Image (cartoon, rainbow, N blue to C red):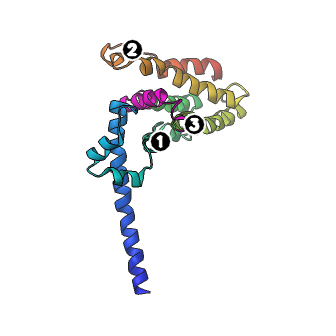
Amino acid sequence: MHLAGRAGWASCGRRPVRRDRRSAILAVAARHFFGQGFSATTMSSIAADAGGSKATLWKYFRSKEVLFEAVVETATERLHGDALAQLSAPGDPLAVLQSFVIPLIDALRSDDSLTLQREVGAQAIRLPRAAALLRRRLVDDLEAPLSDFFAAHMANGALRGDNPDEAAWITLALCLGFNHRHLLGGDDMHRDGEVAEGAPDVMKILRRLYGP
């Protein structure tokens, strides 16, 4: 019994170490994948930069594809920032909707997010699971709660319309659509000082469509 207890404690002690090691590998892999691209990155270079052997790396991730998917999963855990939390806030529904749109667009346009979207898009055919994961984070995880928000406020007359699913789809399409100039424009978008369309433009359209 005593030995079993000691073995149990030892096992518990190893788990945090393994999690920390995995997190460290993912951080290094993210720098390689998003700095050099998936195709140019090798497992050997990641292992060397992570301070371990290639054999150790394979214990955690059985292929470069699996490692890339894990990097995408970690990078997209909070891709939409705090936007979702805003939908449950009290107040005027259009003001609440604006408080959802602003952090979402800000998150989509961050340098890390744009790099992530570009690389996953470039590998979408080769790595469909990574592309599906990004879509789930960007669309599916937001669409249902956004539809519930519209349904509640359409039902009480605070917002116009009778199709909350369509309203949710349009809102996300606008947020993602206004992101395309940054997504395709590269770093010059920031240097040129050009004022791109953003949250005010999205809200102008949404007010016309759903405002009371």
Q: In the rendered image, is residue 105 in sight?
A: no
Q: Earlier in the sequence, mark 1 or mark 3?
A: 1
* Disc sitting over residue 142 in the figure: 3
Disc 3 from disc 2: Cα separation: 26 Å
Give yes or no for residue 125 being in the magenta stretch.
yes
Tag 2 residue: 195
Amino acid residing under circle 1: Glu
Between marks 1 and 2, how big is the CA–CA gap?
A: 34 Å
Q: Which is more toward the observer, 185 or 190?
A: 185
Image position of 179 (left or right of 31): right
Q: Quadrant of the N terminus?
A: bottom left
Which residue ends up furthest to the bottom in the rendered image? 1
Dot 3 amino acid type: Leu
Query: Quarter-wise, where is residue 59 in the image?
Result: bottom left
Left or right of 181 on screen, residue 166: right
Q: Which segment is the magenta one?
A: 107-129
Helix, strand or loop under label 3: helix
For image coordinates 61% across by 35% down, the residue present is 143
Q: How many marks?
A: 3
SS assignment for the magenta stretch, majority: helix
Label located before the other in sequence (1 or 2): 1
Closest to the observer: 185 or 89?
Answer: 185
| Residue assigned mark 1 | 69
Task: Give the label, 1 or 3, closer to the camera.
Answer: 1
For label 1, count other residues whose C-alpha is less than 10 Å away and answer few (under 14), some (14-19) or many (20+). Answer: some
C-alpha separation, residue under disc 1 versus residue under disc 3: 21 Å
Q: Amino acid at mark 2?
A: Val
Residue 108: image location, x then y, percent = 45, 29
Tell me the quarter of the picture where residue 114 sits. Answer: top left
Residue 117 against residue 72 in the figure, above or below: above
Viewer-nearest of discs 1 and 2: 1
